[in-house]
Amino acid sequence: MNRVNTKTIIKTRDMTKIGMLSVIGFILMYFQLPLSFVAPPFMKLDISDLPVLMGAFTMGPVFGIIIAALKNILALIFKGTMTAGVGELSNFIISSTFAFVASYIYRNHRTYKGAIIALTAGVISMTILAMASNYFVVFPLYGKVMPMDAIIAMGSAITPKITGLFTMMIYSVLPFNLIKGFTTSAVMMLVYKKISPLFKN
């Protein structure tokens, strides 16, 4: 009976932590910064991946994916969407990849240097997948919401080097995700030691 009660308590605690981090991630999605020098208006910088990383690092990679999914579901329900859910899908893919890769590496290298390597690998993986998913899935779906020519024109307004979907990936999606990833990583390095004890199992 004690074992059953203990397992129930652990599950309840995990669910509470997941809920808290998901809500924090959702709230952080409201605090966005446009990067008009590199990205069109519908791509904005936020640090909502921070709670996702925190959950993945302290509880495990799978928990990070769950938190990434829940924060975007909350965004769809309470914030609404201007992209028919495409932006939220993109956020989930990128956020969960970042957290999964970084936390998986950190589990085996729990040092300051290991954290830097893990986060860097996470940013690189996130950026590569962001380019692939945006090229083959996300931007084509955006094209069903607004004309693709209009999307490319937004990119061309940033730099004349953007002339099509592929160059949009190279000159906009690539630098945007690197900036977002390393910004979130820097904040993570600053707050992890102070906040992580609250969420560790």
Image (cartoon, rainbow, N blue to C red):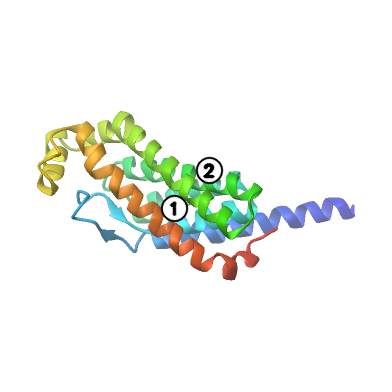
Image quadrant for the C terminus?
Answer: bottom right
Q: How many marks?
A: 2
Label 1, residues with CA under 10 Å away: few <14, some 14-19, many ≥20: some
Q: Judging from the image, what secondary structure is the residue with disc 1 in?
A: helix
Residue furthest front as drawn: 113
Q: Give the percent coordinates (x, y) of residue 117.
A: 52, 50
Closer to us: 199 or 109: 109
Marks 1/2: CA–CA distance: 24 Å
Disc 1 to disc 2: CB gap under 8 Å: no
Which residue appears at 10% of the width and 47% of the height? 157
Please report whichever mark, 1 or 2, sits nearer to the chain's N-terminal start.
Answer: 1
At mark 2, the secondary structure is helix
* Residue at (30% x, 41% y) in the render: 84
- In the displayed image of the protein, which residue is found farthest to the top? 136
Judging by the rendered image, the residue that carries numbered circle 2 is 101
Quarter residue 200 falls in: bottom right
Image coordinates for residue 73, horizontal then vertical, percent: 44, 48
Where residue 22 sits: x, y (%)?
A: 51, 56
Q: Residue furthest bottom?
A: 194
Residue sitting at 44 percent across and 53 percent down? 74
- Front-most of residues 67 and 182: 182
Q: Amino acid at mark 1?
A: Leu
Camera-nearest residue between 166 and 151: 166
Q: Residue 74 — which label?
A: 1
Q: Is residue 43 above or below residue 23?
A: above
Amino acid type at circle 2 is Val
Marking on residue 137: none
In the image, is 193 to the left or to the right of 128? right
Q: Residues within 10 Å of mark 2 (few under 14, many from 20)?
A: many
Q: 162 left or right of 81? A: left
Mark in front: 1 vs 2: 2
- Give above or below for 59 relative to 131: below
